[in-house]
Amino acid sequence: MINPFIIANAEKCISCRTCEVACALAHSSDALQTPPFSPRLQLVKTFNISVPVVCRQCENAPCANVCPHDAIVRSKKGHWDVIQDRCIGCKSCVVACPFGAINVVVSYGNPAQVNSEAHKCDLCSSQPEGPACISACPTNALVLVNERDLKQHVAQKQQRTANNDVSISSSRTFL
C-alpha cells in the first residue's frame, strides 16, 4: 500500500509562494511575525519551471531509518511525523531524504539557547480540512494522491503507449 502524498504540476505553478505561507501558518499562528519562517515545503525554481518540493511519505522512509533518536515515526494515519522532543537537529534525515524534502530549522532563544528542529510535510495532520498548501494554491497545482490515483495514472500511460501514442505530454507533473 502506498501512503498518500502531495504532487505538484509545474505547468500550473506560478511561483507565488502561497503554498509556503499557508504551510507555515498551518504549523504556527505567528509564523509570519517571528523568525524563522519555516514552511514544510520549499518552492524550487529552475529556468522557466517552478515547483514545490514536498515529502513523498515514503513507504520505507530513509529519513526515519537513519534518525539516531527515532524522532521520525509513522502516525496512525500513515504519514511520517517528527517528534520534536526527540529530534537533536543532527541533519541525518536531511542527507538521507532522496527528495530534499526535509529541512533543519535553527532558532535562537537567549544567547545560550539554540533549538534545532527537523521540519517535513505531515500533510497538515492537525488540520481537519487537510493540507493547507492544496487549498491555498490559486492555480490548483498541488494535488493529494493515493494509491488508486497512481494506479489510474499508470494505466492511462500504458494505454497511450499501447495505442502507439508517442506524443510527449505537456503536463509536467512530478511524481
Image (tube, grey):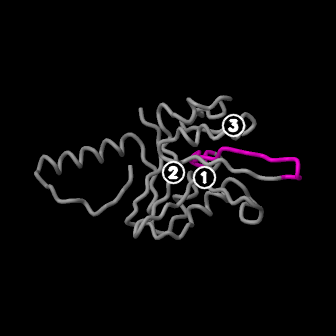
Q: Are the two marked residues, 3 and 2, in contact with CB atoms closer than 8 angstroms?
A: no
Q: Nearer the viewer, residue 41 or 151?
A: 41
Tell me the quarter of the picture where residue 141 sits: bottom left
Query: Residue sitting at 78 percent across and 46 percent down?
Result: 115
Look at label 3 and name its amino acid.
Answer: Ile
- Judge whether residue 110 is colored magenta: yes
Element type at mark 1: loop
Element type at mark 3: loop
Residue 63, numbered circle: none
Q: Which of the two discs, 3 and 2, labels the residue nearer the N terminus?
A: 2
Q: Which residue is mark 3?
A: 83
Q: Which of the two discs, 1 and 2, labels the residue nearer the N terminus?
A: 1
Q: Which residue is mark 1?
A: 40
As drawn, is 22 to the left or to the right of 43?
right
Neighbor class of circle 1 (other Cα within 10 Å; few <14, some 14-19, many 20+) is: many
Q: Are the two marked residues, 1 and 2, in contact with CB atoms closer than 8 angstroms?
A: yes
Neighbor class of circle 3 (other Cα within 10 Å; few <14, some 14-19, many 20+) is: some
Magenta portion: prevailing SS class:
loop
Neighbor class of circle 2 (other Cα within 10 Å; few <14, some 14-19, many 20+) is: many
Look at label 1 and name its amino acid.
Answer: Arg
Q: Which residue is mark 2?
A: 54
> Where residue 123 appears, x then y in whole percent?
56, 47
Query: Residue sitting at 48 percent across and 44 percent down?
Result: 56
Q: Nearer the viewer, residue 71 or 100?
A: 100
Q: Nearer the viewer, residue 1 or 40?
A: 40
Q: Which residues are magenta?
A: 109-125
As drawn, is 158 to the left or to the right of 37?
left
Distance in Å between CA atoms under marks 3 and 2: 18 Å
> Where residue 27 appears, x then y in whole percent?
68, 53
Q: Which of the two discs, 1 and 3, labels the residue nearer the N terminus?
A: 1
> Where residue 63 appears, x then y in whole percent?
56, 36
Look at label 2 and name its amino acid.
Answer: Val
